[in-house]
Amino acid sequence: MSSVTLPRAVGGGAGNTGAVLDVVIPVYNEQAGLAPCVRRLHRHLAESFPFPFRITVADNASTDGTAAVARALSQELDGVEVLRLAEKGRGRALKQAWSASDAPVLAYMDVDLSTDLNALLPLVAPLLSGHSDVSIGSRLARGSRVVRGPKREFISRSYNRILRTTLSAGFSDAQCGFKALRREVAEQLLPLVEDPGWFFDTELLVLAQRAGLRIHEVPVDWIDDPDSRVDIVATAVADLKGIVRLGRALVTGKVPVAALRSRLGRAPLVEGVPAGMLPQLLRFGGIGVLSTVAFLVLYALLRPALGAQAANFVALLSTAIANTALNRRLTFAIRGGEGAIRHQLQGLMLFALGLALNAAALAALNMAAPRPAHAAELVVLLVANAVTTLLRFILMRVWVFRAP
């Protein structure tokens, strides 16, 4: 991972050629708040940022006087430029502005400047040094200080919990309006990001994570804007639809994760580590088939001597322990003994869940037919095991072997 070659700014101002940092401010109908925001940001960069910078106002189809205010600012302040889009959409504005920029580091922040600007240099420094590829401000990281209402706090935490559960997101705050990335990363990821609205941030970060890029998080001081005009309900619905679309694209292979990882990501510490849900699911499925066959063989051998329930218990316990061990090493690529006992204990909890499902299935069969044929028992247990296998994969992925 190479670092950025940095031209020195004369006096830290923006009037130098070759901006190192391009800060995009996407706006829609912000004629009242735009000028104070840009002047404050420009002053902060001129006084504290040691390299040439640019501020790009991305006006996505405003219908008020925002465009005129932006043009006036570009004439008043060195290093301020305006990009006018014909269609709405924050994601669309960021994608077009970043795609057109020649700066080595690309950033954006919301026009309300809810995030303390003192976090800007810590945000971009890991990108300038080459340490990281993407950098995000986080309102949920340890050390952050946030002032906002309980409703927005609950929605934010719930949304990020959903991302961790459904898309295995490893970052803490997907939608804080304070992010940056290296231009060469943007060139590879932006063509794959489909969402033109608020889900843009999440989609970009998930792709960056799946590509094996290093994502740096900066705890921020953040004060909620009471005049925010974001429609929370509509945004939440759009985000949930985005999660479903992106999850389907990752599972079906529509997103070329392997190609991205080979071009951008770091080499794995252990060769053969499966990347993404689909390879894990295939390995888990193969182990599940072997476990099911082993279970049925053991059950058939033990059934005459132990009876149905006892044979079911012994067969399921034996295969559960072996299943957890195999999935630990082959599906989730965990080597060494650290955490092995904890993983087996958690696996046994999943075994208890499977036992309860199988026992319930057998009990239901015996209620329906007091003397069921062995073939009927095997069919019922096969179906119950299929349900248990699906639950085991989900719980292993999001709980037992979830990456920290």
Image: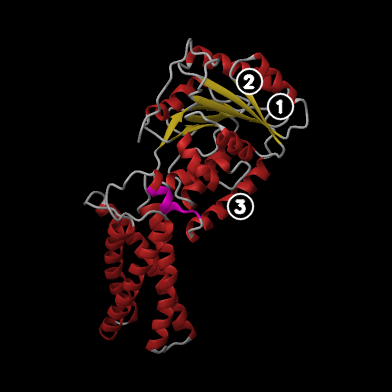
Residue at the disc numbered 2:
37
382 to the left or right of 147: left
Position of 124 relative to 388 (above/below): above
Which residue in the rendered view is the most extreme toward the left? Answer: 337
Q: Which of the marked residues, 1 or 3, is nearer the chain's N terminus?
A: 1
Label 3 and label 2: CA atoms lie apart by 32 Å
Q: In which quarter of the image is the C terminus?
A: top left
Tell me: 230 left or right of 371: right
Determine the residue positioned at 46% across, 18% down: 51
User: Magenta span covers which residues?
Assistant: 255-262
- Compared to residue 268, the image places residue 307 above or below, namely below
Instruction: Using the numbered discs, state the Cα–Cα distance from disc 1 to disc 3 in whole angstroms.
Output: 28 Å
Query: Can you give x and y, in whole percent of width and height, for residue 66 in the image?
Result: 73, 26
Residue density around tag 3, few if under 14, some if 14–19, many if 20 or more, within 10 Å:
few
- Tell me the chief SS of the magenta region: helix
Q: Mark 3–mark 2 contact, CB under 8 Å?
A: no
- Which residue matches tag 3? 241
Q: Which of marks 3 and 2 is nearer the N terminus?
A: 2
Q: What residue type is labelled 2?
A: Cys
Q: Which of 261 and 310 is in front in this view?
A: 261
Find disc 1 in the rendering and name its residue.
Answer: 30
Residue 280 in percent (x, y) is at: 38, 59
Q: Nearer the viewer, residue 370 or 222?
A: 222
Label 3 sits on a secondary structure element that is helix
Q: Which residue is drawn at 46% across and 22% down?
A: 121
Across and down, in percent, residue 332 comes to 33, 56
For residue 398, the mark is none
Label 1: state its secondary structure: loop
Taking depth in this image into account, of 263 and 402 the one nearest to the observer is: 263
Q: Is residue 38 above or below residue 198?
A: above
